[in-house]
Amino acid sequence: MPAQNRRTSLDEYFRTGGPPLKKEKIEDNVKTESSQSNGGAATETGSATTSIHQALASRWTTTSSNGVANGAFYSVKHESLPKPNGKMLNCLHWFRRDLRLQDNPALSYATFIANQCQTHACAIYIISPEDMKLHDDAPIKIDFWMRNLKCLQQELDKLNIPLVIKTVPKRRDIPQVLLDFCDQHGISELTINHEYEVDEDARDKKVQRLFESKGKHVHGFHEQCVIQPGKLMTQSNKPYTVFTPFKRAWLSLVEVHKISPGQFADLQLAPKLEANDVKVRDSNSSFHTLFTDKSLTTIPDSVPGFEMPADLQKTAHQMYPAGEADAHSRLDNFVRDKVKLYDKKRSLPGEPYTSTLSPHFASGIISSRQCLQAAVKANNGKLSSGSDGIQSWIQEIIWRDFYRHVLVHYPKVCKNQPFRDEGNNIQWATYNEDEENEAFFAWCEGRTGYPIIDAGMRQMNATGWMHNRLRMATAMFLSKDLLINWQRGERYFMQCLIDGDLASNNGGWQWAASTGTDAQRYFRIFNPMLQSEKFDKSGDYIRRWVPELKTIRGPAIHDPYHVLDRKAFEALNYPKPMVDHKFGRDRALQAYKAAMHAGSAKQ
Ligand SMILES: Cc1cc2nc3c(=O)[nH]c(=O)nc-3n(C[C@H](O)[C@H](O)[C@H](O)COP(=O)(O)OP(=O)(O)OC[C@H]3O[C@@H](n4cnc5c(N)ncnc54)[C@H](O)[C@@H]3O)c2cc1C
């Protein structure tokens, strides 16, 4: 059936609650559960509000009992859903990691309530410098988010939805600030798209408790993954801990249910009305000031403490223009010109054959469902067959889901703990503090003497982005060749990356450091020279980022210290390798072997 016909219109959603799940078709190894959600049986009122909510919320239900998700729709109680019939409900959408208009279920729902009440939705974004600091957010990432907020605000403006900006210095104050804001402005309904990290989850639960204590409601939706965490469990109802079976189950579930990434696309935002059309029936509230007081909606250019050097800012603005429209044209161009070659070229850091959409994914400017939809469309509607390039790209979207599912089921990964308990036993190299700092900073700055490693680190320092192949190689170099605790590297990446994202960064680091979900474990140790010869054969990528080597031709580019004669090498003014790879490899194997055999994973 053409994808177009599979899409369900808004009206149909209202009427039917969306297409039914066909559980009987699900492969044996895919465990789903009944459509009973955590909130208990839905009260079937027949009202449009309830049925659209059910449609959104009951797409998937959860078997999760991990206390994190506490049911996939943990902050939604069907009984508490607003039934606007006759009632005036003012609704606020709280933007967090969903900086987009399209395919945004919580925003759609806010505008839906507003439409029903013939009023307008409003939106808020909370800047929390303390959160940014604690999460090691990179200045380049914050700059990107601020620029995108401005674009989002312009787009929302066209729909007469004000985007209020509030700075809350202490993050523990956020729930109360939100509640006070809603009290002050006569708002009873808050919509959010869930965030899964431990701190964010705790904050949202607090918000919900506070709101409920005042008779207000929080409506939560899931949009970060194609399949929301908790929905994909093994046959024995355990979370997947290995990627390949997760991928098989994921593909099977998506295939069976025709998860149309655009399932929310039909939910139209409120039509544009003029400011004086805003009806505020609750005359005691100052709801209307949100539409008129421009001082509430000022977005800062930067956040104090996160200023960026001018040259980095210039690069970031050139490489990453802001806005949902730009994200979509990036996606369109990628899908039109590159994705079919993705399987062959995705590992070549010198060639622009990856989507570079990670900053947009991380901030929710684009959704994984939208990207999946574009990929499937380019693949003539196929998910698990057709173009190898497209299937390979879809696999990356699955990796992204996988690490989010891992984070939800194993919240310890948010708390500086390895996924595998044996990771705690690793004896990192015995440097004295100065030596370790020296080695660590040489790695950070791209002065290891391994050209491919240095090129990767310098690319990240100069642009806030690094090619995946180099993220793997540099992470492995730190945690294996240098035998320095991977958590230092994980932190440094977050402090530099425009796409810094806890689940993916942590997943990637633990993969490289063999403390994570990787089935191959500790004996996978990349040889930097071989990586270089294989993935940057011409050396062009190295020459671009390591100008000391720009005159080198031939194989010496991969290992100048050993290939060139001493005089020629010294003339380069490039460091010699800071550790011999064979020595580093043997040392790591010993340390990891001892650690891994000292205990077994408690999963
Ligand atoms: C040590 C390490 C740290 C990483 N840190 C981050 C991070 O902080 N933020 C981040 O978004 N990605 C991270 N990744 C994953 C990956 O490197 C980037 O997502 C990718 O390089 C982004 O480039 P792209 O958008 O061109 O990706 P594409 O190759 O076009 O892939 C499309 C999208 O799929 C997702 N994706 C791709 N590969 C992975 C992966 N291995 N794991 C999870 N998602 C993936 C990303 O959202 C990406 O934008 C890390 C990987 C490693 C090994």
Image (tube, rainbow, N blue to C red):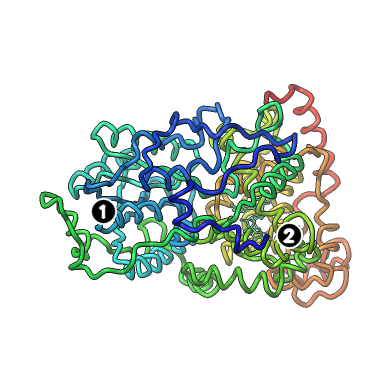
* Ligand 1 lies under 8 Å from the Cβ of mark 1: no
Looking at the picture, tell me which residue is in the foreground, 313 or 225: 225
* Three-letter amino acid code at the position of disc 2: Lys
Q: Quadrant of residue 514?
A: top right
Residue at 55% from the left image edge and 60% from the top image edge: 359
Q: List x then y, in percent, for residue 248.
A: 75, 44
Residue at 54% from the left image edge and 43% from the top image edge: 59
* Disc assigned to residue 297: none
Instruction: Please state if 346 lies on the left or on the right of 54 as rendered.
Output: right
* Three-letter amino acid code at the position of disc 1: Cys
**Picture quarter with the N terminus:** bottom right
Q: In terms of secondary structure, where does tag 1 sit?
A: loop
The answer to whether 569 is drawn above or below residue 482 in the figure is: below
Instruction: Please state if 245 lies on the left or on the right of 228 as rendered.
Output: right
Q: List x then y, in percent, for residue 83.
A: 30, 43
Q: List x then y, in percent, for residue 167.
A: 30, 52
Q: In terms of secondary structure, where does tag 2 sit?
A: loop
* Disc assigned to residue 117: 1
